Amino acid sequence: MPVFRLHRIKDNPREHFRWSAHAAGTTLAKPRDYEPGEEFTAASSYALWETLRGTPAALQLGDILEGPDGGLRIYKYVGFEEAQWQVPAVLAGPLPEAAAAAAAAI
């Protein structure tokens, strides 16, 4: 049976997520807004949701399940939808003069 890792959204970002408009498609999630949680064994994300429902560990809006393949599913009002970790953009191109000078001094 597959193992799912739970990522719990922190309280402040949860309130923002809860009141934001629903957007279809892949949700970009910031890793800093989540705390890694427990691992659970279940047949699917919905089976895990059903198992945890009504317990203190129940899934809450904005929580993310990481599947055995590394895929992320975020829990929304409409069910589970695809999610990805948002990674900061890396600027390509030459370094500014001050950074180049500092790198050369090392």
Image (cartoon, rainbow, N blue to C red):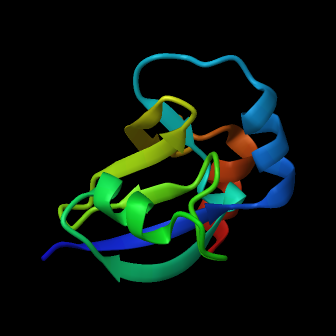
The number of callouts visible is 0
Is 82 positioned to the left or the right of 71 in the image?
A: right
Task: Tell me the quarter of the image containing the C terminus.
Answer: bottom right
Q: Is residue 11 above or below residue 24?
A: below
Give the image location of residue 66, x and y in percent: 36, 62
Write down the quadrant of residue 59 in the picture. bottom right
Figure check: 100 above or below 76 = below
Decide if residue 93 is in sight here.
no
Query: Which quadrant would residue 83 be assigned to in this image?
Result: top left
The furthest residue to the left: 1
Q: Residue at x 23, y 58 (%)?
A: 44
Residue at coordinates 25% horizontally, 71% vertically from top-left? 42
> Residue 30 or 49: which is nearer the viewer?
49
In the rendered image, residue 60, in percent from the top left (x then y), is placed at: 64, 54
- Which residue is drawn at the image coordinates 84% and 42% (left, top)? 15
Camera-side residue: 47 or 102?
47
**Which quadrant of the rendered structure holds the N terminus?**
bottom left
**What residue is at 81 percent from the left and 36 percent from the top?**
16
- Relative to 22, say whether 106 is above or below: below
Seen in the picture, residue 20 relative to 1 is either above or below; the reply is above
Left or right of 38? Residue 1 is left
